[in-house]
Image (tube, helix red, strand yellow):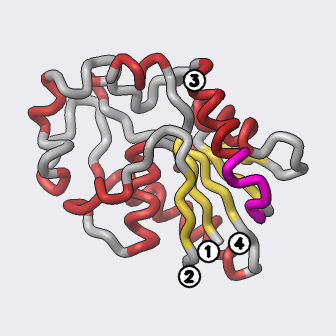
Amino acid sequence: MIYVIRHGKTDWNVRQLMQGDVDVPLNEAGREDAVKAREANPDLPVDICYCSPLVRAKETAEIFLEGRNIPVIPDDRLREMCFGVYEGELAMGEFKETGFYEHPEDYRTPEGGESFEEVFARTGEFIREILAPLVKEGKNVLIAGHGVMNCAFISQLEGTAVKDIWKHMQRNGAVYMLDWKP
């Protein structure tokens, strides 16, 4: 079984700023999101956890797994999508004009940013190299990540096209469960 958790809230989530690769920490509400997720899923059978190296995802995983002897392993391929020059800008400001929300299949990658194809490529590599072998061994894996990265990750496991990527969007602290077989 695969479990995918989105990091808890940050001050940038509250202000609706594009975080991307910026290493923004959880706020108190974000830590509470992780505690609530843990309390809602007390017996989730997790053998190992991989997470984004960004502190908001790593801390969410650690809080979620608190009291359990489960390794939390950062992997750079699970970091959030980079929004380049728009990181730190309002999500519904000028960034909206890139087509990101309305037509992700036509998204115009900003200067210094990543395309959906690049995010799918690196998360796909993680799925092939790390996740598939673990699932074949019968391991239950928790992935702790971000809004867009999680959508790309889940989309690949479920065979969803980029144009439908937003159907997998999670609220902060939400856990998505997939019974996926490689």
Residue type at numbered disc 3: Ala
Q: Which mark is residue 132?
A: 1
Along the line of sight, the residue nearer the viewer: 78 or 63: 63
**Which label's residue is closer to the chain start, 3 or 1?**
3
Left or right of 97 on screen, residue 64 = right
Q: Quadrant of residue 76?
A: top right
Relative to residue 96, is residue 178 drawn left or right? Answer: right
Q: What is the three-letter code of the residue carrying label 2?
A: Pro
Which label's residue is closer to the chain start, 4 or 2?
4
Quarter of the image holding residue 120?
Answer: bottom left
Residue 171 relative to residue 27: left or right: left
Local SS, label 3: helix
Residue at image mark 3: 29
Percent position (x, y) of residue 78? Answer: 53, 48
Residue 164 figure quarter? bottom left
Q: Quadrant of the C terminus?
A: bottom right
The answer to whether the residue labelled 1 contacts the one labelled 4, judged by CB atoms less than 8 Å apart, is: yes
Q: In the depicted view, which residue is nearer to us: 154 or 76?
A: 154
Question: Real-space Cα distance between discs 4 and 3?
Answer: 33 Å
